[in-house]
């Protein structure tokens, strides 16, 4: 994206082997950053150790990003953390209560971490994104499970309900989220800190 140069920056993308993480890694690379991907084997990643992966993973990722980016750290000249929450943290969509709870926790973690970083003089910005439903493997699985509990006739009906709640009238695409990651990582977002950015076509209004 023009004007969002990340040349000379380093980025670590967790869950970067596929889905939103892979899209973010590609977009960060295209913006000039050196990108490292951290992922787990597909099978291991899919056991939905949901609380550990969604919440503890974000917590530990933020903690170790602080350690690396704070003054005196291994890469101690500030930096930024972009956590991935979800539109599920901003609305009450049925059948995904546990998932929504973990993503609400990521939202709160982000805001408190930004405050702690500021108070401790770390200079690390911390923001999160609320993606709408993206038809990645996880997004499709969420739709299937939502239909599976009987609240919708089938998966197509569950997806149609999401689209119906979305003013932009479509599902999200990986690139929609990736572009937002690049923006928040760039100096264009230098005074944006401690927020959750909806990238959901308006679903979470
Ligand atoms: N797809 C959606 O509709 C959607 C919507 C809102 C938020 N999100 C969030 O976006 C993020 C990415 O979702 P996605 O749709 O790309 O999922 P995905 O399942 O397509 O990809 C997730 C990737 O993360 C990896 N992974 C799993 N556990 C890991 C761990 N402990 N450490 C490192 N990597 C791990 C997996 O191996 C996989 O490559 C998730 O946090 C998800 O909750 C997704």
Image (cartoon, helix red, strand yellow):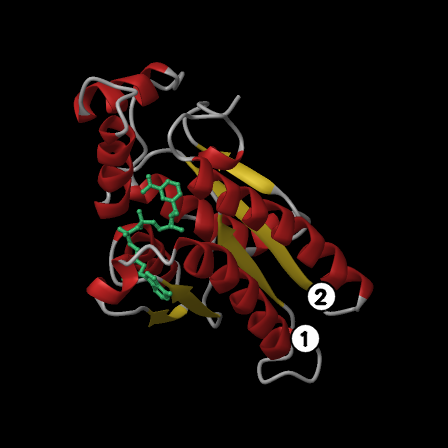
Where is residue 43 drawn, in percent x and y? 21, 63
User: Label 2 CB, ligand 1: below 8 Å?
Assistant: no
Label whose residue precedes the other's in the sequence (2 or 1):
1
Residue 26 can be seen, yes or no = yes
> Quarter of the image holding residue 78?
bottom right
Total marks drawn? 2
Residue 41 versus residue 2: which sits nearer the camera?
Answer: 41
Where is residue 33 drawn, in percent x and y? 41, 67
Residue at 24% x, 44% y is 136
Element at badge 2? loop
Crowd rating for badge 1 (residues with CA inside 10 Å; few <14, some 14–19, many 20+): many
Residue at 23% x, 30% y is 148
Element at badge 1? loop
Q: Is residue 173 above or below residue 75?
A: above
Residue 193 can be seen, yes or no = no
Where is residue 194 drawn, in percent x and y? 66, 48
Left/right of residue 11 with respect to residue 36 in the rendered view:
right
Residue 191 versus residue 112: which sits nearer the camera?
Answer: 112
Q: Which residue is mark 1?
A: 70
Crowd rating for badge 2 (residues with CA inside 10 Å; few <14, some 14–19, many 20+): many
Left/right of residue 116 with respect to residue 96 in the rendered view:
right
Residue at 51% x, 54% y is 83
Q: Which residue is mark 2?
A: 123
Residue 171 versus residue 189: which sits nearer the camera?
Answer: 171
Residue at 49% x, 48% y is 183
Where is residue 106 drawn, in percent x and y? 55, 50
C-alpha span from label 2 to label 1: 7 Å
């Amino acid at each position: 994206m023009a004007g969002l140069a990340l040349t000379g920056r380093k980025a670590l993308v967790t869950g970067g082997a596929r889905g939103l993480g892979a899209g973010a890694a590609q977009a960060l690379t295209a913006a000039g950053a050196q990108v490292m991907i951290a992922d787990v084997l597909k099978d291991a990643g899919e056991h939905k150790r949901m609380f550990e992966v969604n919440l503890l993973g974000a917590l530990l990722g933020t903690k170790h990003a602080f350690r690396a980016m704070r003054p005196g750290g291994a890469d101690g000249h500030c930096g930024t953390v972009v956590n991935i929450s979800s539109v599920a943290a901003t609305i009450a969509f049925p059948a995904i209560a546990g998932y929504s709870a973990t993503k609400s926790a990521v939202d709160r973690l982000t805001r408190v971490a930004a405050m702690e970083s500021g108070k401790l003089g770390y200079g690390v910005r911390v923001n999160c994104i609320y993606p709408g439903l993206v038809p990645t493997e996880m997004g499709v699985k969420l739709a299937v499970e939502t239909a599976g509990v009987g609240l919708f006739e089938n998966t197509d009906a569950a997806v149609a309900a999401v689209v119906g709640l979305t003013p932009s009238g479509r599902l999200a695409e990986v690139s929609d989220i990736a572009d937002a990651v690049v923006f928040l990582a760039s100096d264009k977002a230098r005074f944006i800190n401690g927020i959750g950015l909806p990238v959901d076509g308006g679903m979470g209004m």
